[in-house]
Amino acid sequence: MSGELVLVLNCGSSSIKFALFDAAARPLPRQPAWRGKVQDVGGAAPRFDEGGEPEAVELDRGRPYPAALALIRERVQARLAGRRVVAVAHRVVHGGRRYCEPVRIDDAVLSDLQDYIPLAPLHQPFALEAIETLLRTAPELPQVACFDTAFHHTLPEVERMLPLPWDAWERGLRRYGFHGLSYEYLSVALPERHGELARGRVIAAHLGSGASLCAMRGLRSQATTMGFSALDGLMMGTRCGALDPGALLYLMEIEKLSLEDVARVLYHESGLLGVSGVSPDPRELLPREAGDPRVASALALYVRRIVREIGALAAVLGGVDLLVFTAGIGEHNAELRRRICAGLEWLGLELDGAANAAHAAVISAPGSRIVAAVEPTNEEWIAARAAAGICFGNRG
């Protein structure tokens, strides 16, 4: 590490990821000088992990989240060796209608963002807790919020609208879309690797514990599968994805589940975990598939929902030139990529099995009408670049 540094924080409900970028370098390096995470925050076995063997740590059980943030700050300070953190960038999941670009945070911005907690209850409160803690303990340190919803502000109105009474639209009920930092990175990286093809009809598949698709044309979002909340669209690790609203009415009216019960089911007990009864992680499910019908059904439904939604986005774009897989599952699970691509042969997609198994940058066969690709995402760099740009005018 050299010079001044930008700290990026990505705060989830049970983990806090961090990365440090050299703010003085032009262009800003795409790989951090150092990264790590605190895992199982609030759980029985919290750990500090910087890429090697995770280290067991003690956190205040009464206030585990502030304790985890204090631990990160302590470890960062120990590594600075005369350097200093000059800005902090936060991944904030929801920016609502108001925030369509990164913004420097003050008390007024923080107050606005607290209004969006009900729209992203798994992520928003924890990012805001980190922001509030730093505003109180290090008020001189510039903080920048980078929004997962911002990339989708280019959606045409017909894609943003929900078929609800008009006053719902006026109150802000609309499709926002998420995983925007990931898709923004692809909008930078794909032209570098694929040239003009990337400016055509692109479908990006961000497949991780959360999952969504984004249809892009001219490197701008034209449609996406997540909607008003991060529950919509694809089946995920523990989230249901798109669901008949009548099923929710049934759960509440007939089975007498409370609002809190339904939220728990939809966010934490559905998806791959709910259907399989085993795990939200395909790496654990695939080896058990042959001997467990529920696991087989979960994986089949997971793939079917992705194929179905890619077909829908292909219709919106009028075809597909480039299909890109990214995020943990998209980048590393060759078998699920194979199954998804097999369901898209009708679009003229031909997979190169060896390239796919090797996680190559291009996994389609030379004669394929659609180029299928794998592109590692880099949300941290997008956030660091935004903070450097706002605070120092360095957007390299």
Image (cartoon, rainbow, N blue to C red):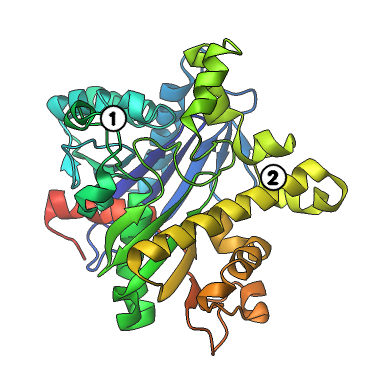
Where is residue 209? Give x, y as percent.
55, 44
272 up-or-down from 385: above or below: above
Q: Secondary structure at mark 1?
A: helix
Figure quadrant of the N terminus? bottom left
For label 2, the SS is: helix
| N-term-proximal mark, 2 vs 1 | 1
Q: Residues within 10 Å of mark 2 (few under 14, many from 20)?
A: many
Q: Amino acid at mark 2?
A: Ala
Quadrant of residue 182 within the rendered picture: bottom left
Q: Residue at x 46, y 67 (%)?
A: 324
Q: Quadrant of the C terminus?
A: bottom left
Q: Amino acid at mark 1?
A: Ile
Say which of 335 and 77 sits in front.
335
Question: Is 36 placed above or below 339 here?
Answer: above
Q: Quadrant of residue 31?
A: bottom left
**98 relative to 383, above or below:** above
Residue 373 position in % (x across, y down): 49, 73
| Total marks in image | 2
- Distance Cα–Cα, label 2 vs label 1: 38 Å
Decide which of 222, 10 is in the foreground and name it: 222
Whether residue 72 is visible here, answered yes or no, is yes
Neighbours of disc 1 within 10 Å: few (<14), some (14-19), many (20+): many
Q: Is residue 290 above or below residue 360?
A: above
Left or right: 107 in relation to 200: left
Residue at the far bottom in the pictured view: 367
Residue at the image position 62 percent from the left and 42 percent from the top: 54
Q: Which residue is mark 1?
A: 131
Could you tell whether 105 is left or right of 185 in the image?
Answer: left
Q: For residue 381, say whether it is visible.
A: no
At 61% from the left and 13% from the top, the residue drawn is 255
Q: Which residue is mark 2?
A: 298
